[in-house]
Amino acid sequence: MQIIANIFLIFFPFLFALCFHEFAHGWVAKHKGDPTAEMMGRLTLNPLVHMDIIGTLILPLISIFSISHGGPSFFFGWAKPVPVSIRNLKNPRKDMFWIALAGPLSNLILAFISSFLYVFVMLKVDSGMQDALKKIFTMFIITNVSLAVFNMIPLHPLDGGKVLARFLPAQINYKLEQNEHISGLILLFIFMSGLGAIIAFPVQWITRMLINMAVLVLAR
């Protein structure tokens, strides 16, 4: 059944990538002096801890149902943000930059590792198993690159907004943070309307670059 196959092929990689992303935020926050995520049990890959009912379950599963029945290939979701207490940070402005950047970087690391596994499968695995493994690793690479690119959009409440804050005057960033609910609605409209497909271009470029790097290393 196609919907079951898509749950394994799309939803589970997405779920792991989300959990790793949030874990990375909490891990860097801890090393910057803030133990809040650890104290609240968020330094884990357990999906139940990071799960948002709407963003992690309902919307992604509706998207998979649509894709499985020939509908729009729109996929969108999120996890519960890892809590960070700025008061515990030694240099809040600089530390928040690294905490925010940790999420997208963690997804790029996963995509980088997966690209090597993908190329290894192409070169070393028998053709009988190759197609299934290639689909799994391809989806995992695309999922992680997509999360990294999406989260680096420079708008609050995304990580990109917090990364950009490192370079903005504090007063301007404060106003942007105060209006992040408006930014959130704009983002939701963009992706619900299909305009979010524009991120496919950087996603495809980064995916090809990672796989080409893996080919250069492994195909010698």
Image (cartoon, rainbow, N blue to C red):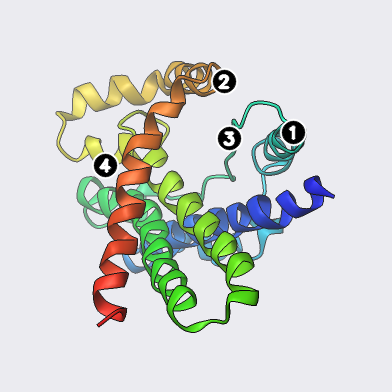
Label 4 secondary element: helix
Query: Is residue 42 visible in the rendered structure shown here?
Result: no
Q: CA distance from mark 3 to mark 1?
A: 10 Å
Which is in the foreground here, disc 2 or disc 4? Answer: 2
Horizontal arrangement in the rendering, residue 2 relative to residue 140 (left or right):
right
Work out how far the residue at label 2 is from the one at label 4, CA to CA, in angstroms.
25 Å
Question: Which secondary structure lies at badge 1?
Answer: helix
Q: Residue furthest right?
A: 1
> Callout 4, which amino acid?
Val
Circle 1 Cα neighbour tier, 10 Å, few/some/many (<14 / 14–19 / ≥20): some
Q: Residue at x 55, y 53 (%)?
A: 18
Question: Marks 2 and 1, Cα distance to the nearest angstrom?
Answer: 13 Å
Is 168 left, or right, of 160 in this rendering? left
Q: Going 31% across and 61% down the picture, which residue do you hit?
A: 210
Q: Secondary structure at mark 2?
A: helix
Q: Earlier in the sequence, mark 3 or mark 4?
A: 3
Circle 3: element type: loop
Residue 192 picture location, percent across and down: 57, 20
Q: Which residue is mark 1?
A: 62
Which of the image's four quarters has the C terminus?
bottom left
Q: Cβ–Cβ below 8 Å for labels 2 and 3?
A: yes
> What label does residue 163 carry, if any?
4
Q: Is residue 190 above or below residue 137?
A: above
Q: Nearer the viewer, mark 3 or mark 4?
A: 3
**Residue to which mark 2 is pinned:** 192
Q: CA distance from mark 4 to mark 1?
A: 31 Å
Image position of 147 (left or right of 45): left
Looking at the image, residue 147 lies above or below residue 167: below
Instruction: Give yes or no for contact between labels 4 and 1 (Cβ–Cβ under 8 Å).
Output: no
The residue tagged 3 is 76
Looking at the rendered structure, the kind of residue marked 2 is Met
